[in-house]
Image (tube, grey):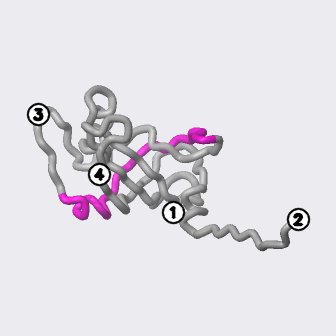
Amino acid sequence: MSQEDIEFNVSQEDLLEGTVLKPGPYLLEIKAVSQNPGKNNPQTTTTNLVFEVKSGPDLRCPGVIIKYYLNNAEGIPRRKAMDFYAHLYGKEIDKPMNMKQKADQMIGRKIKAYVVNEKFNGLMQNKIDGFLPA
């Protein structure tokens, strides 16, 4: 049997991303935004958002990281994206439009969301179930 050292590092971000919060309404802040071609359909665009939890019913919440993905594919994915942008900007999307904003202008913006727990790849994690009025 080998006497080799086995090393495993855990960062503060790993701990925060792994903290499973009590379901409820939370105030989130956008920390990072990027866009890539859709994973399953490269003809679509996926927006990757990283949120940091600022406050909410679980006292462990400040600093917890939640990742969220939007897609512009037709149907439910596009409706989820419309719901996010409507709550982010505080106004209903009631007519056709082309929304464009620099990613760095989204960073730091705050939005309320309802967070639930979901099992993914065998681990419980936080999931944004919907966005809430400010």
Do tag 3 and tag 4 residues touch (Cβ < 8 Å)? Answer: no
Q: For the residue labelled by badge 1, is the local secondary structure a helix, a strand or a loop?
A: loop
Residues packed near mark 3 inside 10 Å, few (<14), some (14 to 19) or many (20 plus): few
Residues packed near mark 1 inside 10 Å, few (<14), some (14 to 19) or many (20 plus): some
Residue 111 counted in the magenta span: yes
Mark found first going from the N terminus, 1 or 3: 1
Image quadrant occupied by the N terminus:
bottom right
Q: Nearer the viewer, mark 3 or mark 2?
A: 2
Residue 5: x, y in percent? Answer: 77, 73
Q: Which residues are magenta?
A: 102-121
Residue at image mark 2: 1
Front position in the image: 83 or 100: 100
- Residue type of the residue flagged with mark 4: Gln
Residue at image mark 3: 96
Q: Farthest right residue?
A: 1
Residue at 32% across, 35% down: 41
Residue at 71% across, 70% down: 7
Residue 70 counted in the magenta span: no
The answer to whether residue 132 of the structure is visible from this angle is no
Mark found first going from the N terminus, 3 or 4: 4
Mark found first going from the N terminus, 4 or 2: 2
